[in-house]
Amino acid sequence: MVVENFRPGTMARLGLGPDELLAADPRLVYCSVTGFGTGEGAALPGYDLLVQAVGGLMSVTGDPDGEPTKTGVALVDVITGLHASLGILAALRHRERTGRGQLVEVSLLGSLLSALVNQASGYVAAGAVPGRLGNAHPSIAPYETFPTADRPIALAVGNDGQFAALAAALGRPGLATDPRFRTNPDRVAHRDELRAALRDGLSTHGADHWAEVLPAAGVPAGPVNTLDEAFAYAERLGLEAVVDAGGTPQVAHPIRFGATPATYRLGPPELGEHTDAVFQKGRAAPADRPRGVARGLSPSGVGTLRRMAVDRRTEQPGRAPARTRTNLTLGRALVRWTTTTDHKVIGNLYMTTSFCFFLFGGVLALLMRAELARPGCTWSPSTSTTSCSPCTARS
């Protein structure tokens, strides 16, 4: 399985595109993640903020009177990763049945548009272009945050029965029979009046009070927690939100398996911890390795790659000079050649090259000796130059 998220065309230029790798191993599942697909948007860089903007998410996020707002986390990246995982699993299932892999393509923009769910469906089916509603819902009320005596609380009242329970818990049962609020369409149509009535009722106590009273009455409600409060809340509910992974605390995976529970054996790797193992993987593979699959690098080859990386890090920020890029290209080619070529051929080439260097050095020494033999000429070891008197040289 291969997963890559370079700009379209990069892997092909490196000889690692899907056509090349699938030809070498037809069972391969090759997942390519792009920002805007492989067509007209292939050259566009894909960043979460950018896709949130051009994909419409920011247009429906934020206060109606404020600026379009991004989400608090890189949500598009997360959604795209989930879609990529789902596509890979489907491709693996296909391979189990047919014995053949395939190319799986996922884009940030496509993933976001599919994740806009009801907002996107409203536009596609009816041409309705939604706007920003703050924390409110376009078709459900009350379904937003409200102030209390100390901090906000979220109410997610999804039906008329829950609204009647909310009105009773607030000590205002008449709200449930008010013609303006009797049904959900009524409440959506009179959203502003509903907000005013609920704010008056909630202002009598703090968020923690209502977070106990309202759920107990069957009303979906909860305070707006900070992250530390959110993790503490999850622990109180028995979700075990934090696990130990090799001595490092990590957020637990949300999927729970009844027969094969997840285990956390390894923590995040140190920088370069597995570099040698990855580059050397396959070097001792059997002789019947599929054609076109290169064997791993030798330890000396890995060392060469490390030196190349160090040289690259010492360059100034930005694109490396042409000379450096040429040297890196030649170095990579040399490492690839030395790890796939017979050692006898390399030895013969080494001896031939050494002989040429010795021959060149001998000729250079004879030329220097002839230069020094001229009258008035001296050799400076410190500067490695020859100087001659002008008058003597002219004579």
Image (cartoon, rainbow, N blue to C red):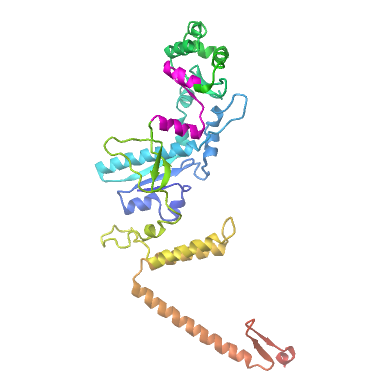
Does 210 appear in magenta? yes
Seen from the viewer's position, the closer of residues 384 and 16 is 384
Q: Does residue 337 appear in this view?
A: no
- Compared across the picture, whether 240 is left or right of 364 comes to left
Q: Position of residue 66 (x, y in %)?
A: 62, 27
Q: Position of residue 18 (x, y in %)?
A: 38, 49
Q: Position of residue 261 (x, y in %)?
A: 30, 39
Magenta region, residue range? 209-237
| Residue at 46%, 17% in the rendered image | 213
Residue 151 occupies quadrant: top right
Seen from the viewer's position, the closer of residues 165 and 48 is 165
Residue 286 occupies quadrant: bottom left
Q: Is residue 221 above or below residue 245?
A: above
Q: Is residue 22 above or below residue 308?
A: above
| Residue at 30%, 42% in the rendered image | 92
Seen from the viewer's position, the closer of residues 388 and 219 is 219
Q: What quarter of the picture does the C terminus occupy? A: bottom right
Q: Does residue 274 appear in this view?
A: yes
Residue 378 occupies quadrant: bottom right
- Compared across the picture, whether 324 is left or right of 334 comes to right
| Residue at 45%, 34% in the rendered image | 231
| Residue at 37%, 58% in the rendered image | 277
Q: Main secondary structure of the magenta part?
A: helix
Q: Is residue 379 above or below residue 108?
A: below
Q: Position of residue 22 (x, y in %)?
A: 34, 50
Does 172 appear in magenta? no
Q: Is residue 320 above or below residue 128?
A: below
